[in-house]
Amino acid sequence: MKLSKPQSWLFIGACVVGALAMGACTSKLKAPATADVAVSQAAVENASSADGTEFAPVEMQAARSKLAAAKAALAAKDYKAATDYANQAQADAKLAQAKAGSAKAQAVSATLQEDIRVLRSELDRAGTQ
């Protein structure tokens, strides 16, 4: 089937409009994906600074792995996957940071409990003399 000249131009115009629309959609996804990866990078760094690697090594490894996947997806221009991986990395980093904070709080609590026990023991000894 051969297209007439006006139909050919109409077809070419439709293809150009379709290609431009796809390009516009892709560029709309790029900025949020780039921002999500940057936020996740900061979350992983914050968790690491909060001793997440020491107190939550599994979660930190998962966060780093997903951040690397997000960066790879971003480089491959798969912006949806980049956003998904970045969000997962951020969640893992926040979990690692929370676990580190909890472990530190438990250590402080244990130290305080021991100090209280020692003080009570000294008070009991002083009261019996």
Image (tube, rainbow, N blue to C red):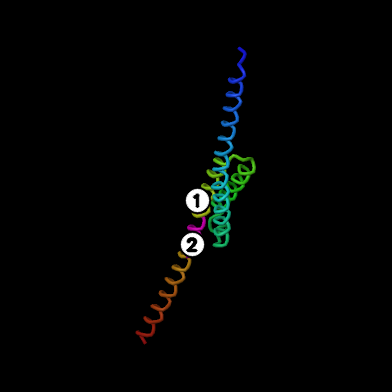
Q: Residues within 10 Å of mark 2 (few under 14, many from 20)?
A: some
Kindly identify the amino acid type of the residue bearing the numbered disc 1.
Ala
Residue 97, percent from left and from top: 51, 58
Residue 52, percent from left and from top: 55, 58
Task: Specify the segment rendered in magenta.
Answer: 95-104
> Which sits in the foreground, 111 or 76?
76
> Which sits in the foreground, 4 or 62?
4
- 3D distance between C-alphas at marks 1 and 2: 15 Å
Q: Residue at x 62, y 19 (%)?
A: 5
The first of marks 1 and 2 along the sequence is 1
Magenta highlight: main SS: helix
User: Which residue matches tag 1?
Assistant: 91
Where is 48 relative to 115, above or below? above
User: Among all residues in the image, which is located at the extreme top?
Assistant: 1
Q: Nearer the viewer, mark 1 or mark 2?
A: 1
Where is 29 relative to 107, above or below? above
User: Which residue matches tag 2?
Assistant: 101
**Secondary element at tag 2:** helix
Q: Residues within 10 Å of mark 1 (few under 14, many from 20)?
A: some
Residue 7 occupies quadrant:
top right
Q: Any magenta on residue 101? A: yes
> Which sits in the foreground, 4 or 129?
4
Residue 8's mark? none
Residue 46 occupies quadrant:
bottom right
**Secondary element at tag 1:** helix
> Which sits in the foreground, 116 or 2?
2
Q: Residue at x 45, y 68 (%)?
A: 110
Where is 68 relative to 120, above or below? above
Residue 59, percent from left and from top: 54, 51
Kindly identify the amino acid type of the residue bearing the numbered disc 2.
Gly
Residue 30, percent from left and from top: 57, 44
Residue 45 occupies quadrant:
bottom right
